[in-house]
Amino acid sequence: MANTDIGIDLGTSNIVMTMGNKGVVLSEPSVIAYNTRTERVLAVGKEAYEMIGRNPEYIAVKRPISEGVISDDDLTHSMIREFILKVTGRQLIKPKIIICIPSSITDIESRAVVEAARSAGSRQIYLIQEPIAAMIGAGININKAKGHMIVDIGGGTTDVAIVSMNGVVTSHTIKTAGNSIDRSIIKYMQNKYKLLVGERTAEKVKMELCNLYDPTDEITYTVKGRSLIKGLPAQLNLSEIELFQAIEDDTFAIMEAVRKVLEDAPPELVGDIYDKGLLLTGGGALLGGLPQLIKRTLGINCHIAKDAINCAAKGTGMAFGKLTALLDGFESATVYKYR
């Protein structure tokens, strides 16, 4: 692997990049801020994220990747270019790049990702499906004729897949994930308490208070926002049970996606999964009580991958050493090479 080879997990919420043998070299929010008057990029990543909800009218703060796909080509090109320049130290190099994408992405969406990388000056571009990358990053040997199941809960999409012999046997992607859970919390606060909260507050509540297995009224978290009735700052205590009620529909949409993939899988592979359990990766894997809820609902053991948030990015970087194996017989399923 060359020292300039770059792996990119192009997430809706975060972009994680690996470089050469250094491992993860960048992990920042997928946010870009620009001046609408001069059309000049002001900030990307953490710096731009800090501007959300605090920006004047002439500064736009955008997430150019929505629900796992590029929603604004120009802004995505600019954002990826800035991140690549950041990790390469502004050197004029033309790296080889592998980009991690959702398993259900269309050819048109794939080409948008490729063009974004090409605009950043890459000389060779590969795409790898998220379930494959996450499993490689979690250290699972996917070469053998054994079934492995992964549930990758990111910001924009949840990817559920069964992998065997280096390929995806069956998969299902839904647009219920971290960001939709945040939106459900915001909606719940508005409808029940007439309290307006921002997406950063909703994310904080989700991380601090979530308990999907045995929520209680006794544990609470102070939520601050603006009263829609008085128009003034306000705060209240939200309980675990109330948070569970707010995100219940999203949680069970993920359960149904897992059930669907199991129903579509060959029985031999389902037997493997029953023996081994399924693997949870992505930021959503850290939702409190999720493994226990899956076990109770579907009867399957669950394991959270080590460093779940960075699994897909690590696997993307490690895929440089497996290109031959992945490309032989699986180009249509896992990796695409554009010349």
Image (spheres, rainbow, N blue to C red):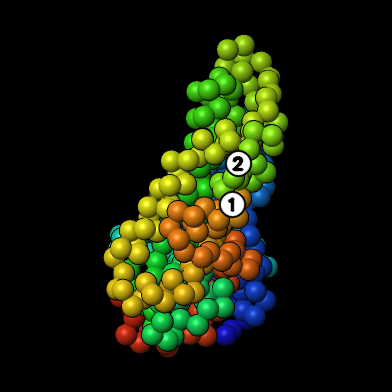
Is there CB contact under 8 Å for labels 2 and 1?
yes
In what element is the residue under mark 2?
loop
- The residue positioned 32% from the left and 85% from the top of the image is 329
Query: The C terminus appears in which quarter of the rendering?
Result: bottom left
Residue 148: mark in rendering: none
Residue type, numbered disc 1: Gly
The first of marks 2 and 1 along the sequence is 2
Residue 233 position, x and y percent, is 68, 19
Above or below: residue 217 compared with residue 167: above
Horizontally, residue 166 falls left or right of residue 292, namely: left
Residue 1: percent from left, percent from top: 57, 85
Residue shown at 45%/81% (left/top)? 142
| Mark sitting on residue 289 | 1
Relative horizontal placement of residue 199, taking residue 208 as reference (left or right) = left
Q: Quadrant of residue 35?
A: top right
Could you tell me which residue is drawn at 51 percent across and 35 percent down?
A: 245
Q: Position of residue 68 (x, y in %)?
A: 43, 54
Residue 66 in view of the camera = no
Question: Residue 221's quadrant in the figure?
Answer: top right
Instruction: Identify the residue shown where x is 44% and y is 85%.
Output: 143
Crowd around label 2: few <14 · some 14–19 · many ≥20 (10 Å): some
Relative to 283, does residue 314 appear above or below in the rendering? below
Task: Check disc 2 and give the amino acid type.
Answer: Pro
- Where residue 215 is drawn, which disc sits there? 2
